[in-house]
Amino acid sequence: MTGLTNQNGGSSATFHFCSSMPLPHSASLFAKSSLTQIVHPRVVLIGLICSTTTSYSAMDKHLQQDKQENADLLRERCTKEACEVGGTRRLSDEILPHILNLYGSCATARDFEIYAPHATFEDPLMRAHGVQQIKSAFYSIPKIFSESRIVEYSITENVISPDTHEILIDNKQFYKFLGKGIDMISLIRLYVEDGKVVRHEDWWNKNPLWNRETVKLPLFGRIIEAARRGSMFTTHLMMGFGKDPDS
C-alpha cells in the first residue's frame, strides 16, 4: 500500500489506495489489504558508538532495547488509529476488506455477512438476488480463473442520509485464465443501508450496466436482464446453491 489520501468535503469522503504488490490467495490477504496498514511515521533512531569495553557494550544493548520498545509502542498506536480520520471511522473501512477477499478468490462465509438478506449483485454477466446467489457468483471465480485480485483501487464514500451510504470503488482487477493475464478496469458501486450492502454493482470498464432503463429499446434491455438471470441460475446450480466450500 503506497498511499492514503482523505478529502473531506460536505457529505463525502475520498480515500485513495494503491497496491503494487500482488495479493496472495491465503488467509493473510485480509491483513495485507486491510485499511489499517498505512505508512507509519518515520521513527528516528540515533545510533550509539559502541566501545570495546564490556561496560559500554552492556549500556548500548540496554539503550537499543529501550528504543525498540518505544518504536513498538508507536507502531501499535499508529495501527490502532490507522483507519480513523479526524476521529471518525468510515463505513468503507469495515466493508472493503471483505470486498477484496471476494474478488481475491479467498472468500469465506464471514465475508458475505456484509450483505443484507435481500441484497442484489449485478455485473454484465449475471444478476444475483439474495446472499446465497451472491455466494455462488463469487465462489465460482476460482473455478474459472487460476488467479484473481484487485490490484489498485480508490474509494469515494458519499453519505446520502444517516443510515444510507454510497461507496464507489474505482479499481483495476487482474485475472489469469489458461495461463494468460487479463487486466480490467472496473467501478464497483455499493449501496449500504443500516450498515449492510443492499446493492452491489460491478461496472466493467466503468460502463453502466445494460438494462431496460439504460438502453434505448426497453425490450432489448429486458432480454439482457433475462439473460443475466439465466446465467445466474446456471451458476447457482453448479455451485450447489451457494454452499460454503468449508461447510
Image: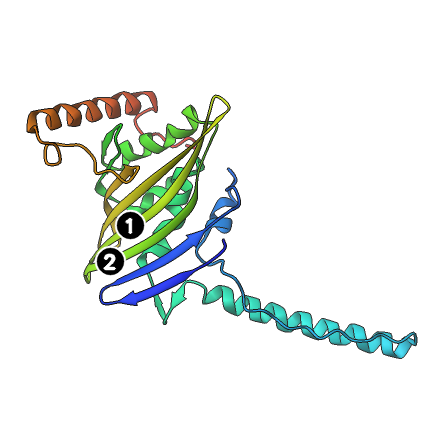
Disc 2 element: strand
- Give 19 or 26, whichever is nearer the viewer: 19
Secondary structure under tag 1 reads strand
Q: Is residue 108 visible?
A: no
Say which label, 1 or 2, has the lower sequence index.
Answer: 2
Q: Is residue 174 above or below residue 228?
A: below
Image location of residue 100, percent across then percent down: 41, 44
Residue 190 image point, x, y percent = 26, 47
Residue type beneath disc 2: Asn
Viewer-nearest residue: 140 or 14? 14
Residue topped by disc 2: 158
Q: Which mark is residue 83?
A: none
Residue located beneath label 1 in the image: 168
Which residue: 19% across, 63% down? 162
Left or right, 147 with reference to 190:
right
Residue situated furthest left in the rendering? 218
Query: Are the residues tagged 1 and 2 within 8 Å (C-beta)?
Result: yes
Amino acid type at mark 1: Leu
